[in-house]
Image (spheres, rainbow, N blue to C red):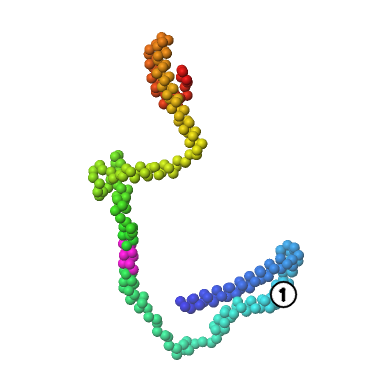
Amino acid sequence: MIACGLEMMYQQGRKEGVESRGSNMETYKDILETSGYFKGLLPGSIEYKRLMEFAEEYYRKSSLALRTSETTSAPVSRIDKILAMPHSADNFKQHKVPPSDDDSLLYGGESELNDALQVRQKEIDQYNAQLRKESKEPEGSGPSLSSANAFVEKVSSFEGAEVPKNRKLGEGEVDLDVDRFIKGMESVMKRYVPESRDGDTESEEQASSSDMEFDESDNEGDIMAPDGDNEDGEDGFSQSYSAALNRELKSTFVGRSFFYDGD
């Protein structure tokens, strides 16, 4: 097996040496073409071949080709010299073969490996158990959090989600501080209602007073209208219907847009 491997390495080195010389020649040819050495001649023509032969001869005699050949073929050359030396099997009998390496670790380490794996598995199980415990009972959790979790996890029926059973309130009782609730609502409303200016306040007061006067005039018109209609001899049903309609419309924007008799 070892001899076969050495033979493969030897042949591979010889092949690489030949290919390296060929690759170097290809690189040299590319340089000649880019520098205009072939003067635009077609590859394969007589003049092209003549110039190529002259360039190859020059390259083989150059110092670069010699150094490249020596470097790539040095390992193969040394092997050739070793193989060419005279040898005999008797020369190797005087040398003792060293003992084989101890390979007991390949067979005796199975139990140790299993023990180490079991210890590691226990560590992983403990870590996972601690992680699950922390996820179920977060730090800082209290009655409010457990109550919220119970409310969220509760499957609601058509009547809605039920109140958790562990609350201390009686049945039907609601713990609501009315005074605090009203004060909170007032504080919220004050935030969103802008303060009115003096001019706006006066205009609002005038508008409210005019509305009150207009409502009073509407009421008077509603009261007087039936009397006037009775004096004129109009039908009683139409009078009562008109009065009822006026009463329904007097508090609306549509009713305020009408003009009544006597306005």
Residue, far left: 170
Relative horizontal placement of residue 237, taking residue 72 as reference (left or right): left
Expressed as whole percent of the image width and height from the top left, the position of residue 1 reads 46, 76
Q: Foreground: 25 or 261? A: 261
Q: Say which residue appears at 25% left-offset and 42% top-offset.
A: 172
What kind of residue is marked 1?
Tyr
State which quadrant residue 103 falls in: bottom left
Q: Is residue 94 visible?
A: yes
Label 1: few (<14), some (14–19) or many (≥20) C-alpha neighbours in 10 Å: few
**Residue 201 located left or right of residue 150:** right
Q: Which residue is mark 1?
A: 58
The location of residue 231, given as percent across then percent down, is 41, 10
Q: Is residue 204 magenta?
A: no
Residue drawn at the location 35% of the way across and 42% of the way down: 182
In the image, residue 221 above or below residue 190: above
Q: Nearer the viewer, residue 76 or 240?
A: 240
In this rendering, the answer to whether 155 lies above or below 63 is above
Of all residues, the one furthest to the top in this rendering is: 233
64 in relation to 40, above or below: below
Q: What residue sits 31% from the left and 71% below the top?
A: 115
Q: Which residues are magenta?
A: 120-129
Q: Secondary structure at mark 1?
A: helix
Q: Most prominent secondary structure in the magenta stretch?
A: helix
Q: Residue at x 42, y 13 (%)?
A: 228
Viewer-proximal residue among 150 and 98: 150
Report the front residue among 199 and 251.
Answer: 199
The location of residue 256, given as percent across then percent down, is: 45, 25
Q: Position of residue 47 (x, y in %)?
A: 76, 66
